Each structure stands twice: as C-alpha cells, then as structure tokens.
Amino acid sequence: MPSLLGICGSLRRASLNRALLRAVGETLPAGVTLTLYDSLDLPIFSSDLPEPPAVSALKAAIAAADGVIFGVPEYNYSIPGGLKNALDWISRPPATSPMRGKPIGLVGAATGMSGTIRAQLHMRQILIYSDAPCMSQPEVLIPRAQERFDADGKLIEPTTRELLTRYGVAFEAFVARHRA
C-alpha cells in the first residue's frame, strides 16, 4: 500500500492547510499512510550555496514516498514564498530531483471564496519543470475553511470529509498508475 508524504506550504502551526492535510490522512483508504513533513523553514535558494542538511532531509523524504500531497495556501493569488523556495531547492539538480516522475496531489483551504484555486494553478505550472505528474480530479479547493474546522483544527464538516474520502481513493489509484 502507498506511503504518502504531506507537505504544508504554510509555516504556521495552526494553518488551515496543515489541518486539511491531517484530515486527508484520516480519510485515506485502509493501508494508505500519510506522513506530514514538519517544516519548510529553509534558507533562501541560491545555486552558489551547498545543499543544506534541511534540504537533503526534505529530498530524502520525498524520494522515500510513493506520492506527495501538498497543502497549498494562497497568498496574494499565488503560493507562499516559503513553498516556492522549497520547490526551487528540491528541483535542483533537475536530473536527480526526487520530484521527477513523483505523483503529486494538491489540496488547499482558504478563508475566502476562491479555495486556493489561483495558488493551485501556479503550483501546477511550477511542477511542470520537475516533470512531476499532478492529479487533476477531484479538486480539493476548500473555501470558508474556518467554518469547516473547529478551533483545534479538526474537520467537522461532513461533505468536506466525503470529498476528501473520494480524493484519497483517486490519489491511491493515481499513485498506482504512476508506479507501474
């Protein structure tokens, strides 16, 4: 059964996207696991620098996973700078990037009405460089997320749980197709 890695694009501990990734993990099919990667607190990318240990650890975690699900917040109609910075680090060098060919899923939660649609579109554009296949359907673009999670970050809204259950089944199949 697939072992998945969840990466939250927000550095905030109380992030709605971190809560969403935990809810994805709770709704995955039996036998499929999701491990949350804890931090994208990395130095600013520069090809003049040697690869920092935190980047090596992130690359190793991605390489070990059968698939990666990104929790994508939307900041100013795009992805957060920390997430873009992490993608810059892990995409280098291109020939040996652990993202190359890795099945990717995107989910996103926002307090507004767009549900991170713009950020996810940008993320898909960025992933083209890494030649990482990204699942298209079902989309998880959660608007008004503060109404769907309680103060402790627990998912309380049943239709969102149903969507995440469908998403987990689809992502397991997507990973299986790309591992074959």
Image (spheres, rainbow, N blue to C red):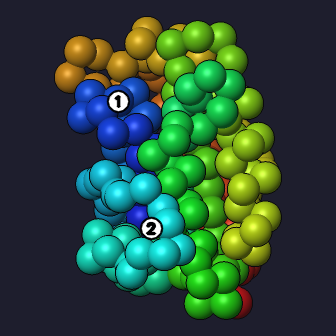
Q: What label does residue 4 carry, if any?
A: 2
Residue 44, percent from left and from top: 43, 56
Q: Residue at x 40, y 38 (%)?
A: 10
- Asked which secondary structure carries label 1, the reply is loop
Between the residue at mark 2 and the residue at mark 1, the CA separation in whole angstroms equals 20 Å
- Number of callouts in the render? 2
Residue 112, percent from left and from top: 58, 10
Instruction: In the rendered view, tell whether residue 6 sits above or below residue 58.
Output: above
Location of the C terminus by quadrant is bottom right
- For discs 2 and 1, the disc positioned in front in the rendered view: 1
Q: Residue at x 30, y 33 (%)?
A: 12
Instruction: In the rendered view, tell whether residue 74 sits above or below residue 87.
Output: above
Closest to the observer: 158 or 130?
A: 130
Residue 26 appears in the rendering: no
Q: Quadrant of residue 51?
A: bottom left
- Asked which secondary structure carries label 2, the reply is strand
Closest to the observer: 121 or 77?
A: 77
CB under 8 Å between discs 2 and 1: no
Q: What label does residue 15 carry, if any?
A: 1
Instruction: In the rendered view, tell whether residue 73 sits above or below residue 165.
Output: above
Residue type pointed to by label 2: Leu
N-terminal of the pair, mark 2 or mark 1, is 2
Residue type pointed to by label 1: Ser
Left or right of 7 in this view: 127: right
Left or right of 121 in this view: 169: left
